[in-house]
């Protein structure tokens, strides 16, 4: 009888120890420091630029999400546009993930035409492979698609992603997709993982909105879906600013260069910055709701002016779990 009791006690003790060890592993998985990554969205990427190279080195960046090209509607057909040119070599030890931005208009044009969705997926994958070879950026193990899809284009986009994921897997590529806050309310897209875009939260057209780039309060209604969102996530935070043109207090557009729009007498050009306080507030909120979304933290995006916007100590706070 005593032997049975001892055996039962040992079994219970071992089970308890196993539970503690597993719980510790889970906690450890979310206490390790995040992977440090960046987006590069410009049409020319110069990794040898002194400021860029220093940032990659000092911030210990190991992953670059490089926008390869956009897909836009041209003469009624989805076509590639604004392909990236790479000047210099990506540092050793840094992984590159190709990113393709697709306008929602392309999804609207495809509609329920499964053949066109399949054709677009094949063309994108083929072009990504060609560019990776030409730019000498391989090997790559992931492809990311960025699209501001809506409820009306969800089915088309998901069909497209399903085809693309199957094709990508045949080439041993994982497929990821960007996730905007408003998309958290919708079913999960058929991708291997996602990147939560913690920016563009406000209405840039509102002249009274001082922080349209990021204010976590603006997306409060979507946050309740984050904890239970059934897709592995990384999180991207902004380090950019906008120059916004208003005419008579009405939004005209975002100025990427001085000749984007004619500047008339009486026009207002207002700079909208990313506020570190808002980044850290969003960071804390997301950490509490979805700690695994900080297994990788990505900054958007890697440009000289953006890099200089914050101090080294600020980046340490952003890249910290």
Image (tube, grey):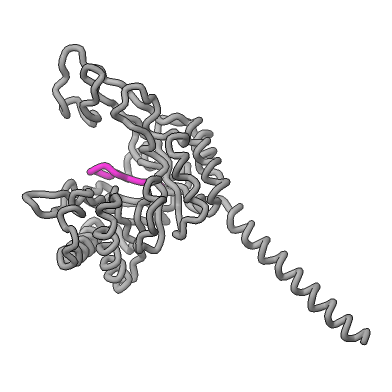
Q: How many marks?
A: 0
Along the viewing direction, whichever of 215 and 195 lies nearer the viewer: 215
Q: Residue furthest right?
A: 2
Residue 306 showing in the rendered view: no
The question of residue 211 being in magenta is answered with: no
Along the viewing direction, whichever of 207 and 171 lies nearer the viewer: 207
- Residue at position x 31%, y 26% from top? 206
Q: Is residue 245 above or below residue 88?
A: above
State the image coordinates of residue 147 (x, y, percent, origin top left): 28, 50
- Residue at position x 33%, y 62% from top? 140
Residue 259 showing in the rendered view: yes
Tell me which segment is drawn in magenta: 38-46
From the viewer's perspective, is 241 left or right of 218? Answer: left
State the image coordinates of residue 321 (x, y, percent, origin top left): 56, 46
State the image coordinates of residue 104 (x, y, percent, origin top left): 23, 49
- Residue at position x 41%, y 31% from top? 274
**Image quadrant in which you'd find residue 299:** top left
State the image coordinates of residue 13 (x, y, percent, origin top left): 80, 72
């Amino acid at each position: 009888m005593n032997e049975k009791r001892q055996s039962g006690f040992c079994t219970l003790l071992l089970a308890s120890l196993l539970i503690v060890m597993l719980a510790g592993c889970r906690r450890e998985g979310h206490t390790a420091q995040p992977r440090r990554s960046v987006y590069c969205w410009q049409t020319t990427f110069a990794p040898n630029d002194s400021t860029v190279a220093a940032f990659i080195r000092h911030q210990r960046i190991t992953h670059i999400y490089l926008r390869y090209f956009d897909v836009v509607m041209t003469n009624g057909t989805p076509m590639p546009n604004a392909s990236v040119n790479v000047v210099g070599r990506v540092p050793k030890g840094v992984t590159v993930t190709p990113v393709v931005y697709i306008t929602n208009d392309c999804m609207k044009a495809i509609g329920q035409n499964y053949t066109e969705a399949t054709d677009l997926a094949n063309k994108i994958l083929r072009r990504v492979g060609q560019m990776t070879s030409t730019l000498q950026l391989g090997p790559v193990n992931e492809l990311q698609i960025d699209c501001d899809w809506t409820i009306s284009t969800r089915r088309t986009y998901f069909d497209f992603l399903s085809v693309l994921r199957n094709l990508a897997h045949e080439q041993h590529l994982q497929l990821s997709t960007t996730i905007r806050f408003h998309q958290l309310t919708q079913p999960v897209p058929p991708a291997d993982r996602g990147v939560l875009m913690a920016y563009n939260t406000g209405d840039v057209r509102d002249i009274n909105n001082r922080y349209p780039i990021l204010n976590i309060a603006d997306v409060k209604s979507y946050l309740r879906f984050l904890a239970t969102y059934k897709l592995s996530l990384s999180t991207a935070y902004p380090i950019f600013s906008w120059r916004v043109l208003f005419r008579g207090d009405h939004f005209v557009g975002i100025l990427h260069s001085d000749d984007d729009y004619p500047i008339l007498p009486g026009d207002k050009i207002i700079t909208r910055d990313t506020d570190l306080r808002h980044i850290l507030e969003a960071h804390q909120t997301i950490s509490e709701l979805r700690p695994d979304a900080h297994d990788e933290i990505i900054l958007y995006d890697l440009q000289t002016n953006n890099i200089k916007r914050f101090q080294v100590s600020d980046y340490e706070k952003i890249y910290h779990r």
